[in-house]
Structures are given as structure tokens and as C-alpha cells.
Amino acid sequence: MVKKWHPLLEGAIDLHAHSSPSIFPRKQTDWELIEDVSRAKMAGIVLKAHEGSTFDRSTLLQEKYPHLNIVGGLVCNLFTGGVKKAPVDMALRMGAKIIWMPTISGAQHKRYFAQHYKENIFNSDEELDEPECGLTVTENGVIKEEVKKVLTLIAQKDAVLATGHLEAKEVMMIVDEARNQGVKRILIQHADLGIAPLSLEQQKQLARKGCIIEKCYLACSQDFQDITVREMARSIEEIGAEHCALVTDYGQAHNIPVVEALESFIVELLEENISEEEIRQMVVDNPHSLIQ
């Protein structure tokens, strides 16, 4: 039987999804994920990979699915060169539309998992050879010069800056510097997730600065349980749907597939009195404006 997808998925874009190939166990391959996106009549998807680039994969997928907007980029982890001008410059020249700040290589990420998990949450047998201290974008209380160069490149290409797993103080500082450098498109990630949380007041401040705030379904999952869908609904009301994007951050092998997760997220928010108009704003309008 052909699955009947929720009508609010039509035209939607999930700005935060994972698929394989990956060093971490994933629920679906790129092809399987894109097939779901197409069948659900979504407009597109953003592919993210902690351990590599996705701009090359998205380019190939786009050729087979010209009716979709399949977006890739580069996460500035140690495996891809860190927050450095050369790898970011090449990624942007190759079509990357999003540059993510450090995630699993970040100092904030490493602190969080050292405190909360004694075993590898990714359920991978692979050991990642990285220094324990982790990457930051600041030094002595200011944004590093090399990071400023990266922000300049993002601004020149009118690409998206995504904040990755930076700690709150770094997020606030890099957003200000990015605006100074002329970056127009900024995605604040994991605002409600324990890995890199932001207070509601900080989220409001960032919204006032023109950023799009991720409302991430993974934060409500059994993996993290940092916030309930009801609490997230109330935060959306406080911030305003015009400043938020619904994302899943799904793709883990033990979770439901990405598009099913986005569908579940939509249904649960509707049950919490978030309107259909607000849902469309957060899954269609805001993602389109960010990555058009």
C-alpha cells in the first residue's frame, strides 16, 4: 500500500537531516531519503554529515531529482580541515550552500558528551582520532581571525552560516561578527537540544537579529528528552513562527526515517495548537527564504 503523507509536508524542506554514506549508522541511504522526500511532495532537503562534505553528494542527487532542492555543504570539523579559509573556499566554489560551524569536533560537544555519556551515543565501532580539547571559534574573548575570513567567504557567496554545536556565548558572538561581515543568512542550530542549548531570551535576541531558529525534533526524542513538544510549541509562540524552522536532525539507525519524523513533528505540534499557517511558515516559507 502506498503511504499517504500529511498534506503539510507538501513544499516543505527539512534543513537538518542525516543519511549514509556515513561513519555513523544511518537509517537510510541518500537515495532512500530522497525517494521519501519526493513521494511526500516535499520541495527539498538539506543533507548534513559530521564527518565529511555533502555538497558533492547533493550535486549528483540534484541531477536525478531536478524537481527537488537538494542542498549540501561543509561541516567545519577536524576531518574537513576545521574552521579554515581554504576548505570553506573550495566547498563554496563547488556549490556548498551551507557552512556549519564545528559539531562533533567542537569543544562544547566534547564537554557535553564527557558529562552525559560514557559510551558512544552514535553506536559506532569506529574510534575518531581527535584531540580532547575540541574546536572553538573564539580566543581570548574575541572571534579568531581565521574564523573572520571564513565569515567573509560565506558573505561573498551569500551562503548560509549554521552555528553547529557551538556554546551559547560563542553563538552570540559569531552572529554579531557574521552580521558585521555581511552574512545575511544565519541558522541557529540545536537551540533546545542539550548539546548546545540557548535560553529562550537568547533565542529571542537572535530572532530579532534576523536569524532563523531551529526547532529540532531530536531534542524531544528518547535520545535526549531535553524538551517536550508542548514546551517547544510554547517557545514557538514566544519567539514567533516567522523566526523558526522545524527540523528533525533525524537519520540515526535506531530512529524512524527523516520524513516520517517531520510528519510526526507536524502532527504533534498541531495537537499543541500550533496552526497550519504557522507550520507552513516553519517548514515551507522560512526554509525556502534561507536556502533559495
Image (cartoon, grey):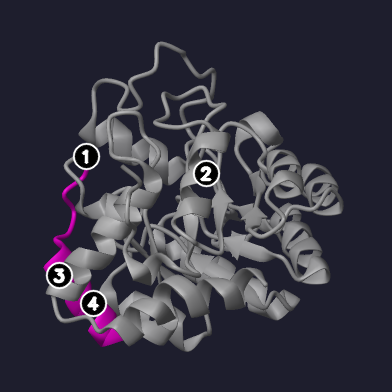
Estimate the x, y position of residue 18 in percent, counting from the top left: 48, 41
Q: How far is the residue under mark 2 from the one under mark 3?
A: 32 Å
Estimate the x, y position of residue 11 in percent, counting from the top left: 50, 70
Q: Earlier in the sequence, mark 2 or mark 1?
A: 2
Name the kind of residue labelled 2 in the image. Answer: Glu
Which residue position is annotated with label 3? 231
Q: How far is the residue under mark 4 from the one under mark 2?
A: 32 Å
Name the kind of residue labelled 3 in the image. Answer: Glu
Q: At numbered mark 2, what does the secondary structure look like: helix, strand or loop?
A: helix
Q: How far is the residue under mark 3 from the one under mark 1?
A: 17 Å
Mark in front: 4 vs 2: 2
Say left or right for 17 vs 59: left
Q: At numbered mark 1, what does the secondary structure look like: helix, strand or loop?
A: loop
Q: Quadrant of the N terminus?
A: top left
Q: Which residues are magenta?
A: 223-239
Q: Are marks 4 and 3 in contact (CB under 8 Å)?
A: yes
Estimate the x, y position of residue 223 in percent, counting from the top left: 22, 39
> Is residue 79 among what the camera can see?
yes
For this rendering, which residue is in front, 31 or 76?
31
Which residue position is annotated with label 4? 235
Which residue position is annotated with label 2? 35
Q: How far is the residue under mark 4 from the one under mark 3?
A: 6 Å
Residue 223: mark in rendering: 1
